[in-house]
Amino acid sequence: MVNPSSGQDAYAAAEAVALRSRGKLIAYLAARFGDVAAAEDALSEAFASALSVWPEQGCPDNPEAWLLTAARRKLIDQFRRNRETSSDDESEQLADAMIAAADGEFPDRRLALLFACAHPAIDPVIRAPLMLQVVLGLEAARIASAFLVSPSAMAQRLVRAKTKIREAGIPFRIPERDELADRLESVLDSIYAGFGEGWGDATGTDPARRELAGEAIFLGRLLTQLLPDEPEARGLLALMLYAEARRPARRTSQGEFVPLRSQDTALWDWGMIEEAESALRDASRTGRIGRYQLEAALQSAHVEGTRTGSVNWAAVVSLYDALVNLTNSPVASVNRALAVAELEGPDAGLAALEAAGADQRMDSYQSYWAARANLLSRTESHDAARHAYQLAIGLESDPAVREYLRRCSDDLPRRS
């Protein structure tokens, strides 16, 4: 211990450890006991003890080890209470297994915790919120606000998920190579879902949703550190960074929607874009291409077009071809049609969009109708474009985007 410190110093030290190491501590404790909720409760009690002890005795030289020891003791006490039939030897063996090395170092089990949160037995809808809470420590109410559900509903879903992990004995382990691809996809998709919720708050007026994008990027960076040989982890990180870098340019100071082609690139975060470019280059060296790398490569093509003043639309169409073949995504199909229009003209784009429209999912997909309206207006089919704009407006939930589409429709020439 160092010299006794003030309550404020103790709080600052505990807060710093919480920000830096909470996820690592939870992962280690949960992996040992197979119980996420119990690990969270024990660590919370350990933090409370720190705020009581540290002001009097001083902050420890290794706060992580102190907290781990305190939480371990609480978990062992609970283990003994819940397993009255267990022998003292069993309890002591468990205690010995939980003791960290003398220097306070202990294994980083966060990757195993992420895979547990994305286990097939866990409802896909709750995987992203579960990761955000157990790895990053976000409160249920904050997550609920970001995912636009009630705090009570989110809390209940999180409790059920943690109970499922305990009762089903979901392992805290990194999958073997033959099953890693499928499980890793669930982890990546969950992190991207969390990012998408934050990205949806374009104006940044909702603090919970605004910060969610940053938390998802943190998880993306963590994943690339823990799985340095997995190119899709780097692809996802690059994709999120490209998108987040444009946030300041997505709305005017009055909150009006600004399409990509009209954004002020001076507002883009070019440092973030450089990080994205580096992550994408590292991913490409493996020769194993996946969805997130393709989507990030498309973002990179638009960035390069901004830098040079000319987009390589042939390359963009080729990337969309690969993405459509890989994912059968309606988003990719619509964007491919728009890229075809840039390369070959609006009639060719409309033909590509008509082909994509055979997918029944397009009937209720706002971007399909917005793209159709845009291409019809470019072929001077103004009445049909106006009708498509009305359908797109009806399907859009963002007021700023609705207003933008309404202006586009109002700008169409009318018959004299």
Image: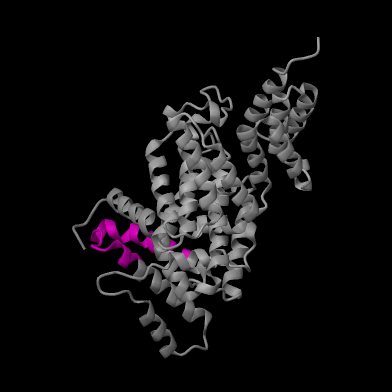
Q: Is residue 51 magenta?
A: yes
**Residue farthest along the top direction in this orientation:** 416
Residue situated in front as seen by the camera: 355 or 42: 355
Q: Tell me if residue 325 comes above or below residue 342 in the rendering.
A: below
Scheme by which the image is coloured: one colour
Q: Residue at x 40, y 41 (%)?
A: 272
The stretch in magenta equals: 40-67
Residue situated in front as seen by the camera: 396 or 377: 377
Residue situated in front as seen by the camera: 402 or 34: 402
Q: Is residue 135 left or right of residue 95?
A: right
Q: Is residue 404 left or right of residue 392?
A: left
Q: Tell me if residue 94 comes above or below residue 136 in the rendering.
A: below
Number of callouts in the render?
A: 0
> Could you say where residue 221 lies in the image, as x and y percent from the top left?
42, 54
* Quarter location, residue 4: bottom left
Q: Residue at x 70, y 32 (%)?
A: 370
- The quadrant the C terminus occupies is top right
Residue situated in front as seen by the camera: 93 or 365: 365
Q: Is residue 300 magenta?
A: no
Q: Tell me if residue 122 comes above or below residue 219 in the rendering.
A: below
**Residue farthest along the left direction in this orientation:** 3
> Could you say where residue 404 lies in the image, as x and y percent from the top left?
65, 25
Identify the main secondary structure in magenta. helix
Residue 251 visible: no
Q: Residue at x 52, y 66 (%)?
A: 115
Residue 414 visible: yes
- The quadrant the N terminus occupies is bottom left
